[in-house]
Image (cartoon, rainbow, N blue to C red):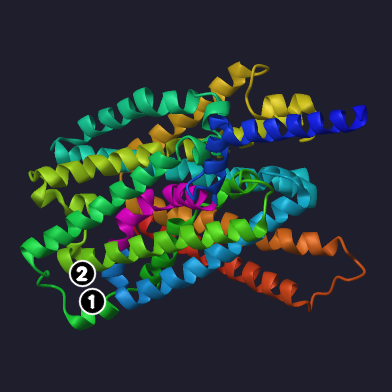
């Protein structure tokens, strides 16, 4: 009898416990967050954050290339680039998951050699430096359009933005600005920045409605270009496409931050969604811009300068300020990989591995080397500001970065990782395996884009 009473009391206690757990508002909130499609660490917010790091600057120079090479060629490049980007992101996520490493430097060290890790980290840092400099160039162009001024005042404004906006963002503790919190706390901010660029598309559509299609646009020139494009122009259009989709520098970290366990399928969904949003926005922008502003020399360095004749309109000013807000919120996403690379160099100099607890302290910039973290952040921002002041052409900057750094990071490193991973299984490895053949082809394409793209990007800079 006593045993039966005890059993009943235990059942009652467990029932009360389950009921209290079910009725707990905290648990209910957590359950709702897990079920919400816009939850922290979910596919949709991760894809939006990845899109945010992609479309902020590249969208502004897309129409310049489309006006030279034609809409059909530019659209074909965008479609091909979108497919290659999805495959590249999947390769990176596979390598990160199988090696349990969450940065380009650590994966390269695991699969190759520290020298390879340093080279890859340097290239990744170059891409991020150029992208961040592009953001400040855009800020300078917005300032010139909204407040007509000379180059000296424009440079002063760029330096001021670097000091008073970018430096505080770069100095923020890594714990507050890692991609984990970007996916979590700022996922709504990322959606707002994408919305700001959509507002720019609406303004371009308004301009075309007010001023009609430009006189220089014919059916042939719109689809095929004015017929004056050279090999360099076609190649630079591809360079711009590579930069336009380049967001791979944050993929290892974002793969780790997906809800539950890191998943290659989950990251593939993120890649497809992010690339689709990017493709649609890019396609809308360059199609409307070419129709509105014309072909060939009628297009200026960026879409911002194209809107200068109507800068007095209040909605144009709002859209331009929204673009500035959008690019500045992307700044930390590009400074973080630079600091990450510099921290990796310090970690190797100290003889630490990525699995060392002390190395993690250095790596994430916590209390141990805060002074070094500050030095890296300020040094990165100063270098970005210097580049933005010296190079005022957004197009030249993006073409070179797309060819030199982004082609290496996006289309050469990922297939090399896959080949190195599969070679670990020496008994079953074969160069004629479908996955290996595809990886070799992907690597060959990346090598072509790296060599000839860089050559084509340098020629206009040198005035040749």
Decide whether the magenta segment is chiefly helix, strand or loop. Answer: helix
**Vertical placement of 428 versus 362: above or below?**
below
Q: Secondary structure at mark 2?
A: loop
Closest to the camera, between mark 1 and mark 2, is 1
Q: Locate residue 382: give its quadrant.
A: top left
Q: Who's the residue at 50% across and 24% down the image?
A: 172
Q: Are marks 1 and 2 in contact (CB under 8 Å)?
A: yes
Q: Who's the residue at 67% across and 30% down the image?
A: 363
- Asked whether residue 374 is in view, the answer is yes
- Asked whether residue 301 is in view, the answer is no
Asked whether 150 falls inside the magenta stretch, the response is no
Measured Cα–Cα span from mark 1 to mark 2 = 7 Å
Q: Locate residue 458: give its quadrant.
A: bottom left
User: Dot 2 surroundings within 10 Å: few (below 14), some, or many (20 or more)?
Assistant: many
Q: Locate residue 209: give its quadrant.
A: bottom left
Asked whether 60 falls inside the magenta stretch, the response is yes
Residue 64 in the image, given as x and y percentages of width and height: 28, 62
Residue 168 in the image, given as x and y percentages of width and height: 43, 23
Residue 34 in the image, given as x and y percentages of width and height: 57, 44
Residue in the foreground of this view, choosing between 49 and 112:
49
Q: Who's the residue at 18% across and 69% down the image?
A: 291
Instruction: Point out the stretch of residues depicted in magenta.
Output: 43-64
């Amino acid at each position: 009898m006593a045993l039966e009473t005890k059993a009943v009391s235990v059942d009652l206690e467990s029932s009360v416990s389950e009921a209290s757990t079910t009725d707990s508002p905290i648990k209910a909130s957590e359950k709702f967050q897990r079920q919400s499609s816009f939850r922290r660490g979910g596919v949709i917010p991760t894809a939006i954050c990845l899109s945010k790091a992609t479309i902020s600057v590249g969208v502004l120079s897309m129409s310049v290339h489309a006006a030279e090479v034609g809409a059909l060629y530019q659209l074909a490049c965008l479609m091909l680039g979108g497919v290659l980007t999805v495959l590249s992101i999947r390769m990176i996520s596979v390598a990160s998951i199988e090696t349990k490493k969450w940065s380009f430097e650590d994966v390269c060290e695991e699969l190759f050699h520290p020298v390879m890790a340093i080279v890859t980290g340097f290239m990744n840092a170059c891409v991020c430096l150029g992208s961040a400099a592009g953001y400040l160039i855009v800020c300078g162009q917005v300032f010139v359009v909204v407040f007509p001024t000379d180059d000296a005042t424009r440079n002063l404004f760029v330096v001021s933005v670097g000091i008073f906006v970018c430096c505080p963002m770069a100095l923020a503790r890594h714990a507050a600005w890692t991609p984990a919190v970007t996916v979590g706390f700022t996922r709504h901010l990322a959606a707002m920045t994408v919305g700001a660029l959509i507002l720019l598309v609406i303004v371009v559509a308004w301009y075309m409605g007010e001023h009609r299609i430009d006189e220089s646009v014919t059916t042939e020139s719109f689809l095929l270009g004015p017929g004056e494009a050279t090999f360099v122009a076609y190649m630079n259009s591809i360079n711009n496409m590579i930069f336009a989709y380049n967001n791979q520098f944050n993929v290892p970290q974002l793969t780790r931050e997906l809800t539950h366990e890191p998943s290659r399928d989950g990251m593939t969904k993120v890649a497809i969604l992010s690339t689709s949003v990017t493709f649609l926005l890019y396609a809308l922008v360059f199609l409307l811009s070419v129709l509105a502003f014309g072909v060939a020399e009628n297009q200026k360095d960026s879409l911002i300068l194209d809107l200068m004749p109507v800068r007095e309109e209040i909605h144009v000013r709002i859209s331009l300020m929204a673009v500035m807000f959008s690019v500045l919120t992307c700044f930390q996403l590009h400074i973080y990989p630079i600091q990450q690379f510099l921290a990796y160099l310090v970690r190797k100099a100290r003889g630490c591995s990525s699995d060392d607890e002390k190395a993690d302290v250095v790596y994430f910039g916590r209390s141990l080397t805060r002074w070094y973290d500050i030095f890296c952040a300020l040094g990165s921002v100063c270098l970005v500001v210097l580049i933005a002041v010296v190079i005022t052409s957004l197009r030249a900057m993006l073409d070179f970065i797309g060819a030199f750094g982004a082609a290496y990071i996006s289309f050469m490193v990922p297939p090399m990782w896959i080949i190195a991973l599969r070679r670990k299984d020496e008994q079953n490895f074969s160069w004629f395996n479908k996955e290996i053949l595809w990886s070799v082809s992907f690597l060959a394409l990346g090598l072509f884009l790296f060599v000839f793209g860089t050559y084509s990007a340098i020629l206009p800079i040198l005035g040749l």
